[in-house]
Amino acid sequence: MRKQSDLVKSEKKHPKHVMPILVLIVIPLVTGLILGYEMSGNVASNIPTVVVDHDHSDFSRTFIEYIDESSFFEVIEYADRDERVEEMLYNQEAFVGVIIPENLYSDMKEGKAPRILTIYDGSTLIVLSAARSAMSEILLTVKTAFMMNIYQGKLGVAPADVMNHALPVDVTYRLLFNPARNYRNFLLPGMLAGLIQVGIACMGADRAGDMRDRGIKFSAHLKTIFNWGIFGTVSIFLTMLEQCLFFGIPYKGTLLGGIVVTLLFSIVVFCIGYMIGSMISDRTLASQISAVLVLPTTILGGYTWPVLAMPDFFQKLAKILPFTYYGEAVRNLCVKPLQFHHLLPTIFTLCIFAAVEIGALYVIKRKGVSA
């Protein structure tokens, strides 16, 4: 009978150990591996491209060679009619089309400014961004080479002065913090943190059910929240460590600051679920509500779409979402060499969130609000 009783107790405790590990450790790590491998190319490359060359000059062929030799493009078809470009983009056989007009080179020599038409598939914005940037660089290179030949050949400008005439204004670009335009560095840290925050909130709602005894001191609730905040911090940092070790995502900021900010964020998110679980006795319903409330904040918090580009209402809404502040902080910690003092505004804001939520939880427990 004693062995049977121990077995029953073990079976009752088993799910409580399995679910947190599954939700906060296993699922984030597996998801991180899948997403990290999926984005291992870092930027869009070998973009299928179709070319229509109506000029058939040495200049146009050189231009096409520049495109084909670029790591961003792969010319998969040399079409003989313009309509073929739209057909291939419509069928997603290609994502970029280049149409070179007749008499391109002769018109350029006569100063008629002919136009090369480049067509992009706007339905895939990441591919569009990479393709437009790379194509602009190729066009600038080709135009500069042409102007240098004109100045040096026809106008007799000295070779040392050719570049100054071909490029009368030298524009220098500096891309700070993510010079390789690596999309993983931009997207993955926040995406994974957004996934984990849902699990933290659900665990908060579930664990509130274990602490529904009104005789429990409020300090016991605080201890539970803090302990699970630590668990959430471990979950996020393990996932980030996985990305750093296996997929080369950088972490350039202060480690101490990252720990403090992540701990506060985990406490805030767990407390959201904990409050909902304290008010709703049905654990499943409380977990579902917590997930529904927390999940959209990854988008509403401005991580995938900048807050400054949102309507006024959503800009104001973003200011009351914890993920708005944490998402920006975690991305900056990955790509910028931030020091601890740079994170003080974020730390202060998350402390306010935590204080307000703990105060609200105290009222809930004191009043015995329950449904």
Image (cartoon, grey):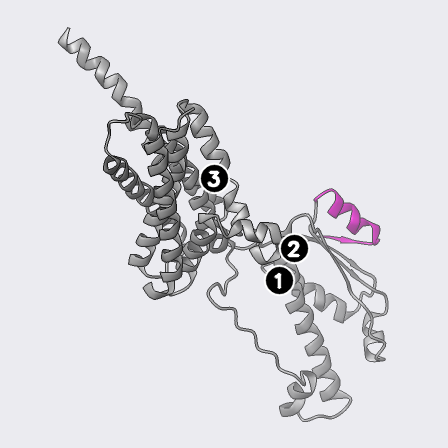
**What residue sits 34% from the left and 55% below the top?**
258
x, y percentage for residue 333?
39, 59
Q: Reply yes or no: does residue 88 show up in magenta.
A: yes
Q: Are marks 3 and 1 in contact (CB under 8 Å)?
A: no
Tell me the element at label 1.
helix
Does residue 93 appear to the left or right of 367 in the view shown?
A: right
Tell me the element at label 2.
helix
Q: Reply yes or no: does residue 89 show up in magenta.
A: yes
- Binning the other alpha carbons within 10 Å of mark 2 as few (below 14), some (14 to 19) or many (20 upward) gives some
**Where does label 1 land, which residue?**
69
Amino acid under label 3? Val
Q: Which residues are magenta?
A: 77-92
Residues 254 and 217: in front is: 217
- Using the image, tell me which numbered label, if any, was put on residue 128: 2
C-alpha span from label 3 to label 1: 46 Å
- Binning the other alpha carbons within 10 Å of mark 1 as few (below 14), some (14 to 19) or many (20 upward) gives few
Tell me the element at label 3.
helix
Q: In what quadrant of the picture does the N terminus appear?
A: top left
**Where does label 3 land, which residue?**
294
x, y percentage for residue 228?
30, 39
Examine the rendered structure and indicate whether residue 295 appears above or below residue 13.
below
Amino acid under label 1? Glu
Residue that lies at the very extreme toward the front in this rendered image: 367
Residues 345 and 8: in front is: 345
Q: Does residue 27 appear in the picture of this structure?
A: no
- Binning the other alpha carbons within 10 Å of mark 3 as few (below 14), some (14 to 19) or many (20 upward) gives many
x, y percentage for residue 335?
43, 61
